[in-house]
Amino acid sequence: MHVLLVEDDAVLADGLARVLSAHGMAVDVVNNGSQADAMLQRVEVAVLVLDIGLPGIDGFEVVRRLRARGSSVPVLLLTARDAIEDRVRGLELGADDYLVKPFATAELVARLKALARRTAPQPAVLALGRLTLDSNSKRARVGERVVDLSVREWAVLEYLLQHGTRVVSKQQIIDAILPWGEDVTLNAVEVYVSRLRLKLGDAGVNIRTIRGFGYMLETAPA
């Protein structure tokens, strides 16, 4: 996921860039609104993290210009201002979310991933082997058999299917399927995976454990 971070505090910007990079994000950093506006016109990014109090063109104006160009890039505002009017103004201009400084970096990461998930196009039906997931009807089937899944079991299975046969870690699953601020352990992911294995039965799909790395889907031998 490519993130553009716009922050004029060099120490904070460096720290945030390191955190986001550690979570597998590609991060570009600029320190003023003019640079951000120019970069957004020539580079495609997945999410924009934007401080409001910037020198020159402030964050509000960056958002206004971005939306005036018809861009739908999700925007998360960072601000030290706690006035409700500033938050409302940012959202009315087209920002998608905001965080008031100081904030926990874990919350920033979770919110960015949530914004990226909401805006990323996904196919309505995911399939592997005899297993199909229909995101419109929220119905899982193995052949003609309907599989009864809990909300979190569905979310884990959907995330695995979205990544095909690539390995995903337990932490990646937690970050992807849970709202920010909700506390779930790595052991809970193991429980959901164990339940899914039992329910999938003859789906022709295995959830394989890659020790030390996470899980991946693979088609089962006939």
Image (spheres, helix red, strand yellow):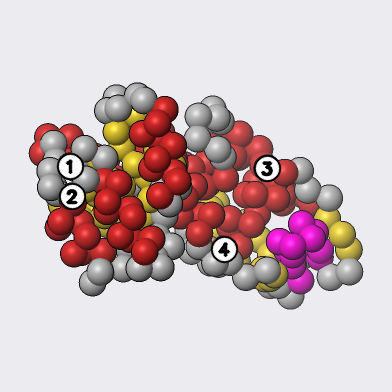
Contact, CB < 8 Å: mark 3 with mark 2?
no
Tag 2: amino acid:
Ile
In this figure, which residue is indicated by the disc labeled 2?
57
Main SS, magenta residues:
strand
Q: Which residue is mark 1?
A: 54
On screen, residue 164 versus residue 158, left or right, reads left
Say whether marks 4 and 3 touch (CB < 8 Å). Answer: no
Disc 3 designates what residue?
A: 152
Visible residue check, residue 201:
no
Kindly identify which residue carries mark 4.
162
Q: CA distance from mark 4 to mark 1?
A: 38 Å
Nearest the camera: 65 or 127? 65
Residue 45 drawn in magenta = no
Q: Earlier in the sequence, mark 4 or mark 2?
A: 2
Specify the segment rendered in magenta.
Answer: 130-142
Tell me which residue sits at (44%, 44%) in the image: 91
